[in-house]
């Protein structure tokens, strides 16, 4: 009797161990990699954005919510080409002096801030003629590092390093210094407000909106341990920010936050990272994932509602990319050497430019750096209306370039 009982007990224990093993292999992994959204208990539901006149991206049979094969050349950081590079790409320098804040304005104009003259300038897009001053505002001898234009290009925020920033009204020429604890600024789509993170002396973050000159600040949400990954969405009624919290063993929980302080459904992001960019319509997001084992930066995409999330298999940075008008393809400057954890590597690379179809995974090299004597380390990319030219700022010499593709 005791022998039979002992055999039955051992059999039950073995079945329990087998069941637990199957759960860990199939059940647990499925939960961690799920792309479905859920309601965080501590954050209320935000506005319903399901009424936009576009459905979540359809990637075609067999690709919905799946990973596109990350076909990288094992010996370099270059995506395996699907189409040959254009060896006849024309590279043209557009500025005589180092410049920041290149942007395409209306009327076929380009605007920028000339770092040597300390002036805001404009000229015909693509022209290599000298530009003309467009404001009496002048910052000669300044250390301006970034220029963030309002959507209408009538005002801008200059960053002089760290949190030393000033709002500049180009029409009046007047500038207003922003608070030293204001950082990570972005404009609303209509240019009437800015959103930023205000960190107090104890490093507690507060998600805040204000007038562009910093007046009338309004705290929208206490951030606590969360951090911002995206600014104000171009989507009408969209979030003013996406904030993220790292979940141990499960990547990141990312939440949209709206102007009324409410928060939307959680989106699960893989890996680590702190940079992302919207498509022009605000319906898709390109973001970086840092692999903590080999410290590779890889691009991923996801719809604004958390659907269709997958890796593009391309190692570069979001500030080296620009979306096309249809939110299908991105154009990215891809370093021609392997990226790693060294923060200075981004400034020491030489880039080729690739077009990546985010639906099919097709990659086309549109500019091969070996075909030009000019070496590019690109940031702040813009695409022409016809998508036949790319404009960029070159970190190597500080000048603005046009590349015909």
Image (tube, rainbow, N blue to C red):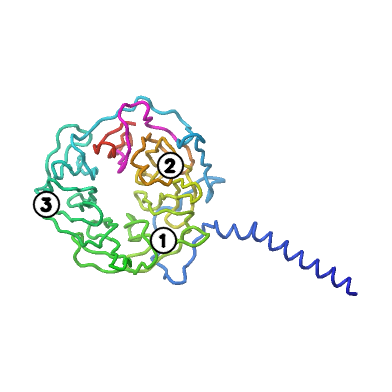
- Name which of mark 2 and mark 3 comes first in the sequence: 3
The residue under the point 41% across, 28% down is: 85
In the image: residue 258, left or right of residue 40: left
Using the numbered discs, state the Cα–Cα distance from disc 1 to disc 3 in whole angstroms.
38 Å
Q: Secondary structure at mark 3?
A: loop
Q: Are marks 2 and 1 in contact (CB under 8 Å)?
A: no
Residue behind mark 2? 339
The label number, if any, that marks residue 244 in the structure image:
1
Is 58 within the magenta?
Answer: no
Q: Is residue 100 in view from this perspective?
A: yes
Q: Nearer the viewer, mark 2 or mark 1?
A: 2
Q: Nearer the viewer, mark 2 or mark 3?
A: 2
Q: Residue 97 appears at what percent x and percent y? A: 18, 37
Would you identify the image quadrant in which residue 46 lies? bottom left
Q: Nearer the viewer, mark 1 or mark 3?
A: 1
- Name which of mark 2 and mark 1 comes first in the sequence: 1
Q: Which quadrant of the rendered structure holds the N terminus?
A: bottom right
Residue behind mark 3? 171
The residue under the point 84% across, 71% down is: 6
Using the numbered discs, state the Cα–Cα distance from disc 2 to disc 3 in whole angstroms.
43 Å
Instruction: Give the magenta range.
Output: 363-384
The residue under the point 50% across, 34% down is: 75
Would you identify the image quadrant in which residue 43 lies? bottom left
Q: Secondary structure at mark 1?
A: strand
């Amino acid at each position: 009797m005791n022998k039979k009982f002992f055999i039955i007990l051992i059999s039950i224990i073995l079945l329990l161990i087998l069941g637990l093993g199957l759960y860990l292999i199939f059940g647990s992994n499925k939960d961690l990699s799920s792309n479905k959204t859920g309601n965080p208990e501590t954050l209320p539901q935000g506005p319903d954005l399901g009424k936009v006149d576009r459905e979540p991206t359809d990637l075609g049979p067999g690709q919905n919510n799946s990973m596109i094969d990350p076909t990288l050349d094992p010996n370099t950081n270059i995506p395996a080409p699907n189409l040959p590079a254009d060896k006849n790409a024309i590279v043209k320098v557009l500025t005589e002096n180092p410049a920041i804040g290149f942007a395409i304005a209306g009327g076929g104009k380009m605007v920028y801030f000339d770092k040597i003259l300390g002036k805001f300038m404009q000229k015909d897009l693509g022209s290599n003629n000298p530009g003309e001053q467009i404001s009496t505002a002048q910052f000669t001898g300044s250390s301006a590092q970034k220029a963030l234009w309002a959507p209408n290009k009538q005002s801008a925020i200059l960053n002089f390093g760290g949190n030393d920033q000033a709002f500049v009204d180009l029409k009046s020429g007047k500038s207003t210094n922003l608070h030293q604890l204001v950082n990570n600024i972005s404009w609303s789509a209509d240019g009437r407000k800015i959103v930023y993170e205000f960190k107090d002396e104890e490093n507690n973050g507060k998600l805040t909106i204000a007038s562009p000159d910093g007046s009338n600040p309004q705290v929208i949400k206490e951030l606590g341990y969360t951090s911002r990954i995206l600014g104000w969405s171009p989507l009408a009624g969209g979030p003013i920010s996406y904030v993220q919290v790292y979940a141990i063993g499960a990547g990141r929980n990312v939440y949209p936050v709206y102007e009324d302080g409410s928060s939307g459904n959680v989106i699960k992001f893989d890996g680590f990272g702190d940079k992302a960019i919207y498509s022009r319509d605000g319906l898709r997001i390109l973001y970086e994932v840092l692999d903590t084992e080999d410290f590779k930066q890889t691009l991923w995409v996801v719809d604004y509602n958390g659907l269709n999330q997958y890796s593009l298999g391309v190692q570069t940075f979001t500030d080296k990319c620009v979306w096309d008008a249809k939110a299908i393809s991105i154009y990215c400057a891809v370093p021609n050497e392997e990226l790693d954890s060294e923060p200075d590597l981004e400034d020491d690379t030489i880039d080729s430019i690739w077009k990546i179809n985010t639906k099919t995974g097709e990659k086309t090299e549109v500019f091969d750096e070996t075909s030009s004597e000019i070496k590019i380390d690109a940031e702040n990319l813009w695409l022409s209306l016809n998508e036949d030219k790319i404009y960029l700022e070159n970190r190597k010499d500080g000048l603005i370039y046009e590349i015909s593709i």
